[in-house]
Image: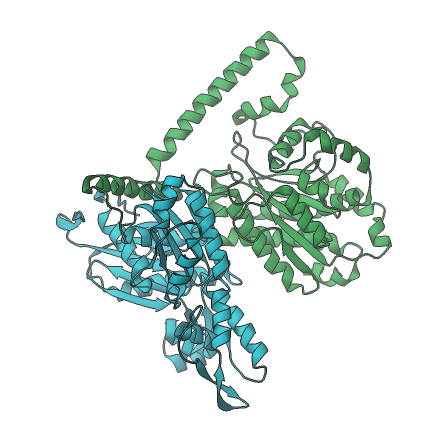
Amino acid sequence: MKQKESSKEDNILFVGIDLGTSRSSISASNDTREWVESYVGWPRDFISLQVVGKPVLFGAEALKNRLSLDLCRPLEHGVIKEGIEKSEEAVKEIIKYLIDLAKPESGQKIYAVVGVPADTLKVNKLAIRKAVAEFVHSLMVVSEPFAVAYGMNLLNNALVIDIGAGTTDFCIMHGTIPAEEDQKTILNAGDDIDEKLFSYLTEKYPNSRFNKNMVRQFKEQYSFVRETPGDIRVEIPVDGKPVMHDIKNEIRRACENILPAIVETTTEMIARFDPEFQVKIKNNIVLSGGGSLIRGIREYVQDSLKEYGSCSVTCVEDPLFAGSNGALKLAEDMPAKYWEPL
Amino acid sequence: MMPAIAGKREFKVKQAILKGVYEDNLKVVGKCAHPLAKKPSLFRNKILLFVAMSLITLLGYGTSSNLSSSPVKQFALSPANTRTPSPPSSEKTLNPSDYAAFLNGREPLSRVFGLGVRTIMIDPGHGGSDSGTSGKMGTHEKDMVLDIAKRLRERLRKHSYYTVLMTREQDVAVPLNKRVELANAAKADLFVSIHLNYLPSKPINMIETYYFGPSSDPKTLKLAEQENAGSRYGMSDFREIIEKIGETIKLQESKQLATSIQKKLFVNSREQNGNVYDFGIKRAPFVVLLGVDVPAVLAEVSCLSNREEEIELNTESHRENIARYLEAGILDYLSKGDLRYEAKREQ
């Protein structure tokens, strides 16, 4: 299936990068698969530099040391709140870090396909190209759901719903590169769940002390919709003492909160197509991104769409790498003549 | 779950998709896209030549003597004349003495009664299926103005005194009359609509700001028609309304707001890039400006037909700057006659 372009130019490393709001991952043609949380932190002063011992930290390590760092999550909401130079720098650092993780041999040429959230792509195409260009020999930038679709060979009559942290991106594939109207982005996504969960918990347990980061961890560990067996209890300090809290209902409410918008957008997007194709697309809906890990989400979406006729919803197997694997596949399939040196 | 397509067809589809990705990316890089970029420009030149020639023929017949001053000609023959268009009426362009006249002008009534501004409604133009204008690199007006609007909102929110709302926060189509309803329902005190300009025949960057009012300039009317296309009112419907309004507080206030925004936008943009033209403040019957009960302006903050400007717009820092100038313009308007902001203005 894959054309091997590398036969004559053996010294090329193809990489697919998924630059996400929350997590970024890389897949390389030397079979490396790595990921990092999209946080970049720089030591605040020379004391913190002494403490952390590095000029720049990434992902979980940066989060752990966040009190001594200037922390930046460069793709949050697509809008950078403060310090634009800083966030551009942060994207650069993440790319550099990821490419280092892919362990290219010295002298090897790097051809990269980078998938970014659809909204970021619209307004920041050039900025992202600039950030990546330093570290690769040739480069293409595509939208994340498109990379996922290509990776799964869903080229025709399929709908990919990529539930990320900052946004949920929809992309309909119908045998060509998706046009503007085949893609849609809504803001109901992972960060939204965090915010809701945070406010529900604050409301229910006003005396307990927790922060956004803890709430995010609760979500990642326990998220579900509808019903799940057993209780969900977590340890949260109250007046310094750890106390068990029941958070099951809050988790459910927060997770279910984003679903109506997703279902509505799905029906809206499918309805634009010919009835004949509508059936085909409806039987080929794929959920990807961190949100597809919410327990019961597949069944929820499928059942909600049932009233519009039969449909089939599946989840990608490996949401963390679905985007980067797809981007890598794009890179490997891309005819050599399309790779232009930067 | 995979579509069962014959291998050969799938290969073909794949090739088409890969080519699409490649071309899409070429468009972004802009300068490297020789095979793509050249074609349309050649085509455009041909059209331009054709239009110019037919115009000359027309002129030769001397069918209308006032054609020479009509905007159609200015657009078509523009490569030769890229200066700031001369204003057909005194209403159009603002010169320094006008600014002075505003400053020394009579106190607006709302101020006399001590009415303050608390809620600011930002209206990013277009959205959803309506992309607005698009640049050659595929940049859409709707995306840019939404991003600028979000940045402006963040900036204004830092002055905790104001409630800042937006008519749309996502890439969705919002009909013009809905925007008007939103602003009125939210009891907005100020309405700022953000748009990008497009001048196909002029390789320049320009800034202009509109406020609501009747206009006699055909070019402005044409633009108003374009921007009003999403509304369900007929042109004749609101001519009547316009005439009724006359010189009201809203008009005065809108004019002042437009002046402040235009001044800050232009002066600051010129510092960044000398090649920008001040098209001044203008009156125009835009629907978004008409229906809103409060001071309302429509700022065309940049020009997407200009290649350099399109590249610039794709950088965050430039969009942040535009948001900053708009913020400065709004604060400048609000601070007139309001001592609370005097200190800030000094900075």
Farthest residue in the top direction? B61
Whether residue B29 is visible to the viewer of this picture, yes or no, is no
A197 vs B242, left or right, is: left
Residue A59: name its quadrant.
Answer: bottom left
The image shows residue B76, relative to residue B8, as above or below, that is above
Write down the colour of chain B: green
Compare residues B41 and A310 and report the one nearer the observer. A310
The correct choice, above or below, for B49 with respect to B205 in the image is above
In this picture, residue B280 sits left or right of residue A130: right
Residue A8: percent from left, percent from top: 13, 47
Q: Position of residue A45 (x, y in %)?
A: 47, 77
Q: Position of residue A109 (x, y in %)?
A: 22, 54
The residue at the point 59 percent across, 43 percent down is B195
Residue B91: image x %, image y %? 74, 33
Is any part of residue A321 visible from this angle?
Answer: yes
Q: Colour of chain A?
A: cyan
- The quadrant of the rendering that contains the C terminus of chain B is bottom right
Model colouring: by chain
User: Residue farthest to the left?
Assistant: A7
